[in-house]
Image (spheres, helix red, strand yellow):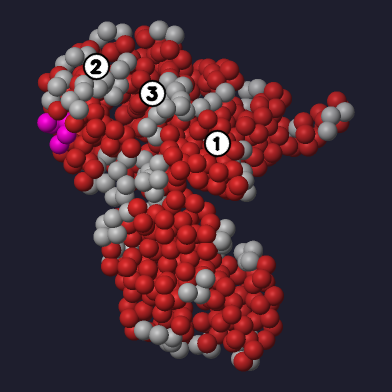
Amino acid sequence: MRGPFGRVLSVCLVAIALTIAGFFSEAPARSQDQDQDQAQDTGQDETSNSILGNYLAGRFARAAQDTEEAADFYGRALERDPTNEVLLEQAFQMETMSGDWSKAIPLAEQLSASHQSHRMSQFLLGVTAFKAGDYKKAEDRFTAASENPIGELTSAIAIGWTRLAAGDTDGALKALDLPRQPDWAQFYLRYHRALIADLAGRKADARASYEKVFRQDSRTLRTSLAYAQSAAHYGDFKTARQVIKQQLAKTQGEPHPLAKEMLEIINKKEKPPLLISSPTEGLAEVFYGLGEALAGEGGVSLGTIYLQLALDAKPDHVFALAALANAQEAVKRYDDALKTYDRIPAGTPLQSAIDIRRAFDLNSLDRTDEAKAILVKLSEQDPKDVRPLEALGNIMRARKDYQSAVTYFTKALAVLNKSDSRNWGYYYARGTAYERLKNWSAAEADLKRALALAPDQPLVLNYLGYSWVDQGKNLKEGTRLIEKAVQLKPDDGYIVDSLGWAHYKQGNFKEAVRYLERAVEIKPEDPTLNDHLGDAFWKVGREREARFQWSQALSLNPEPDDVDKIKAKLERGLDSKGEAKNVEKTRQVQRDELRRRSENKTGTPSRAVE
């Protein structure tokens, strides 16, 4: 799920994330022997007190996304070797990701003293100085962070807001003049130029910048809200209405609650406040925008640091808190996400969406009864809101309570406009539940309806096409649907696997090998795909390669039910009728798991999380 900035900055920011993460992987400089000797001399336990032991424990905790635990271990190691730069860097990053400023700030001071252009430490110290009202020191810190070209954009905008806070509007706008930046960076620069000019009362400059931003991209929620609020704030309700309506028209799925709320305000001709009402909010917006985009596109660690910097500047920044919770969910830190959602001030228009996300997190923690209670209450409060019903349906479907899932999706469809193409996901979800209940006539009808509403949706094409092939009916049409799904999502190993298995089912073993090899190239770590490729290899006489793929599947922690079946194939191959039947039975079970994984990768439309 991409947020307000992720869609615009996604491609460039992923590259930046890989470049500027700066996470060191080498071990600390001191040797293990030194630590063992010191541990023996002092009578301390080597594992819990040595530099190397704590360093390795910190790396393990970090790999498990437990930033607080990692920070603790790196801190212990740093106590033993306070000048070790690797430990200093790791400890700083973990404390910053945890938002523990009492520990992060002293570490930042150490890092910046030894490495003047160290970006993240200078950014943190710049925010600290800004909050203290020392704008000269803040600008010096942000300037130091800009010495590396990658930090130039963030530094320039941060300096702009710092100068505005100091009362220098001309200097603030001048800071944002970076003509050699690429288009995506110019989008971000123009957006902040508009915000700064708006707050400084320079309406013409603000309007010109907003228009350029909107021409470049009218779908991004955050910039559209800023433009509409600015226009309405100054009484130009016509422009404000056009901006919001154009944003809503280009939005896929249910309109965002903030956009709907803004349209209501505009229609009443009420003058809203500006999106950014102070330089402090503007500085927080700098780090929020980059952090949300990075975290949403896979750079979770670096994105989290930026989001924490935004929250350091403005602790109640609703969007930054929501983005931080999303980042924590992405790494399965559901308890942390729940705590972050609890920090969001009550009464926001996002409250229902937040409560739905909390329900999903509770379900992920196997607290399904609590999740269900939240969603049922939301549904009772607003029977016309389909999002809680959809969430209930998806949770029940994931829990394999397919009958309850059908009930909730049916209730949702009763509220919706059945001809709206955005509603294909409800028919798809209910159809898959019907299929698992072995009610194929109802499942087929729903999947066909979903396909009619969304003829280019890979999930529907794959599910309906494979179901037909698996049943031995509509073979040509089913294969054609899967082929189209592969054309639309050529990088989805699970959908490519479906096409390979469709050919396998029809005896086209050479074609099956072709596509199953491609699926394994895309997802080499998946045991099921390796297992399928082994079966296809056997069918074309490549028995040695088949056994290799089955062995590979066993090494990748397959589902417990599959282990004995793979071992049997390694022992006896696929020549016996019994083993051939086992392959079919195994495939039927694996099919649902692969479809679930494909949904998680591709993303079914979920109004509950928008």
Q: CA distance from mark 2 to mark 3?
A: 15 Å
Residue located 62% across and 32% down the image: 68
Which is closer to the viewer, label 2 or label 1? 1
Q: Using a 10 Å C-alpha cutoff, classify the residue at mark 2 as few (fewer than 14 neighbours), some (14 to 19) or many (20 or more).
A: many
Instruction: Name which of mark 1 and mark 3 comes first in the sequence.
Output: 3
User: Which residues fall within the magenta stretch?
Assistant: 238-242
Determine contact: label 2, label 1, CB under 8 Å: no
Q: Which label number is shown at residue 338? A: 1
Residue 243 visible to the viewer = yes
Q: Is residue 399 above or below residue 76?
A: below
Spot occupied by residue 94 in the image (x, y as percentages of width and height) = 57, 31
Of 597 and 173, which appears nearest the observer? 597
State which quadrant residue 193 falls in.
top left
Residue 300 image position (x, y, % from top left):
48, 40
Quadrant of residue 428 within the rendered picture? bottom left
For marks 2 and 1, the one nearer the N-term is 2
- Name the residue located 16 percent from the left edge and 20 percent from the top edge: 234
| Amino acid type, label 3 | Ala
Q: Secondary structure at mark 1?
A: helix
Is 401 contained in the magenta span?
no
Q: Is residue 125 above or below residue 404?
A: above
| Mark 2 or 3, nearer chain start | 2
Question: Is 3 placed left or right of 186 in the picture?
Answer: right
Q: Is residue 176 above or below residue 476?
A: above
Q: How many angstroms separate mark 2 from mark 1 (CA)?
A: 34 Å
Question: Where is mark 3, residue-wise?
Answer: 284
- Residue position for label 2: 199
